[in-house]
Amino acid sequence: MTSLYRIAVNCFREALREPVYFLMLFGALLIIGHYPWMTLFVFREQLKLVVDGAMATTMLFSLAIGVISAASTIAREMRNGTVLLLLSKPIPRWSFVIGKMIGIVAVSVLFCIVCCCASVISVYIAVDQFRMEMTLYLFFLGLLIVACIGGLVLNYIKGVSFSEFTAYLAALLMIGMTIYCLKYQPHPELSLADLGKALFLLIPAVVVMSVLSVGCATKFDVVPTMCLCTVFFFLGLMSSYLFGSGASDPTLSAIYSLLYAAIPNWQLFWMADAMAVNRVIPMSYVYGACGYAVVYSLIIAVWAVVCFQNREAAGSQEI
C-alpha cells in the first residue's frame, strides 16, 4: 500500500506541474467568470445561460484535462521506457496502474471542483439581465491575479513549481469565495440545492473519463489515447440516441445493448437541461448516477490491470 500511495501522489503532482494544466485551469476560470458579461440583455434568460455555459465549460475542460494528463504522464513514461525503473523494484504491476488511476482521477476532480466553485460565483455575479455584481466580478478576477502572483513569488524564492502551487492557491481562493457568496450574498433566483446536485454530478463523469483515459494510456501512445477518448466522448453524448432504443432484429438488439453498456453515457451526468426548466433533481438519481460511475470505473480498472500484466513496459507502443 505504501508503493500505491507514493505512485498516486507522484502522478498527481507530476500532472499538476504540467504547464497545460495551469493554462487550461485559468482559461476555464476566465471563461466561466465572463459568462455574466456574455449573457447581458437576453430577455430574462441570463441565469439559465450562465448555468448552462458554466456547466458545459466545466465538463468539457475537466474531461479534457483527464485525457491530457493521462496521455502526457503515463503514455510518455511507457514510450521512453522510464517505467522500467519503477517496475524493476518489488512493486506489483497492478499497484502501478491503480496508483496512476488514483493520481489522474484526483487531479481531474480537483480541476472540476475549482471550476464548479467558479460556476457558483458566476451565478452570483449575474444579478439580472441588465447588470452584474461588479464588486464580485472584480474580486473574482483579483483572486486569479493573486494566485498567479503567489505562484510567481514562491517559484522565484523557493523554486517550487509555479503551475502546482498556483493550482493549489486558486483552489483555496475559489472555495473561500464560494463560501463567502453562499453565506453573505443575496441568493440568485434559482434552486441552489439543485445547482449543487447538477454540478456535483459532473464529478462522476470526470472520474469515468479519467479512469478510461488511464486504461487507454497504459495500452496506447499519446495520439491513439487522445483519439480513442475523443471517440468515446462523442459516442457517449449520443449513446442513448444511437444504441438506447435497440432494434427490431434480435441480433442487432443484442449488439446495440452491448455497445450501450460499453460506451459511457455522459447524458446521465448532464443536468443543465433539468436546471433550464427548473426541474427538481432527486437524490435517488444522484445516487444512481454515482453508482453507474463506480461500476463502470471498476470494470475499466480491472480491464486495464489485466491488459498491463502481460504487456512489455518499454519499446514501441501498440496501436
Image: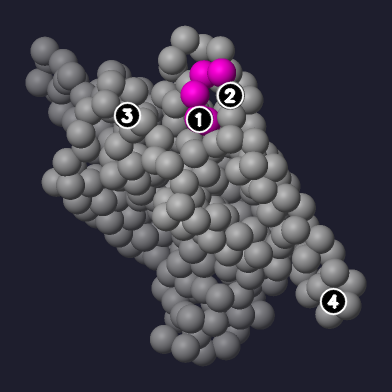
The disc placed on residue 275 is 3
Disc 4 to disc 1, C-alpha distance: 42 Å
Q: From which residue to which does the magenta span run? A: 126-130
Mark 3 element type: helix
Contact check, label 4 and label 3, Cβ < 8 Å: no
Disc 2 to disc 4, C-alpha distance: 43 Å
Whether residue 243 is in magenta: the answer is: no
Give the mark toward the camera: 2 or 4: 2
- Looking at the picture, how far across and down is residue 189, in whole percent? 36, 31
Whether residue 128 is in magenta: the answer is: yes
Mark 1 element type: loop
Q: Nearer the viewer, residue 319 or 32?
A: 32
Contact check, label 2 and label 3, Cβ < 8 Å: no
The vertical placement of 143 against 7, above or below, is: above
What amino acid is at disc 4?
A: Gly
Q: Is residue 265 visible?
A: no
Is 263 on the left-hand or right-hand side of 8? left
Contact check, label 2 and label 4, Cβ < 8 Å: no
What amino acid is at disc 3?
A: Met
Residue bearing mark 2: 131
The vertical placement of 9 against 249, above or below, is: below
Count all numbered tags in the image, as a single digit. 4
For the C terminus, give its image quadrant.
top right
Q: Is residue 191 visible?
A: yes
Residue bearing mark 4: 159
What residue do we see at 60% from left, 84% from top?
88
Give the mark toward the camera: 3 or 1: 1
Residue bearing mark 1: 127
What residue do we see at 14% from left, 46% from top?
284
Contact check, label 1 and label 2, Cβ < 8 Å: yes
The vertical placement of 56 against 251, above or below, is: below
